[in-house]
Amino acid sequence: MQPTATEAKNNECGVLAMSIDRSNDELSGLQRQESALKNRRTNRRGEIAQAENRINQLEAMRGAAQGSANIRHPTARIVAPLTSAAVSAAIRVERDKIRRAEIAVGILDSEIKTTRQRINATKNNIDTARRRRRDLGC
């Protein structure tokens, strides 16, 4: 037996209401995910800034070590090149950290963009369902 027009309308209203509830739950989850991704990206950018600061400090140390090589003291002449090599190695390590963090930031940017698109699509679905409910007079 076919449902009456009123029953069909009430059924569709119920389906739309459940759809809106599910979409709102999904939207909340996506917004939390986007927030977490943005926090991770911010942390990675902080790591980049720290590594850049460390490189600046290391380059200043290398300059000081090279300056001490000009002193006529025999120990300073031996220690300065060793210090300079160690500083260069530390700078390479920091540059590797920066490179890895920049790659991570790029990946996170992509994930944030995808999540933002999903958020917008979910919002559009909710708006469409609300319009349909309004048109039905639910």
Image: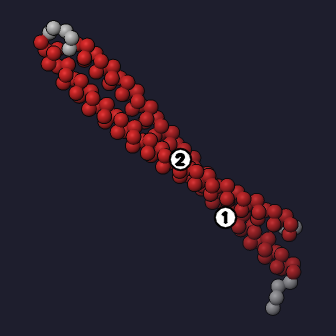
**Other-residue count near label 2 (Cα within 10 Å), few / some / many at <14 / 14–19 / ≥20:** some
On the rendered structure, is 85 left or right of 12? left
Quadrant placement of the C terminus: bottom right
Q: Nearer the viewer, mark 2 or mark 1?
A: 2
Residue at the image position 34 percent from the left and 39 percent from the top: 96
Residue 59 visible? The answer is yes
Mark pair 2, 1: CA separation: 27 Å
On the rendered structure, is 107 left or right of 92? right
Q: What element carries label 2?
A: helix
Label 1 is placed on what type of residue? Arg
Residue at the image position 85 percent from the left and 64 percent from the top: 134
Label 2 is placed on what type of residue? Asp
Q: Which numbered marker is on residue 109?
A: 2
Q: Which of 49 and 132 is in front in this view?
A: 49
Q: What element carries label 1?
A: helix
Question: For residue 68, what is the image quadrant?
Answer: top left
Q: Nearer the viewer, residue 92 or 43?
A: 92
Instruction: Tell me residue 4's x, y (percent).
Output: 86, 83
User: Image height check: is 76 above or below 20?
Assistant: above
Label 1 sits on residue: 22
Disc on the earlier residue, 2 or 1: 1
Disc 2, disc 1: CB below 8 Å? Answer: no
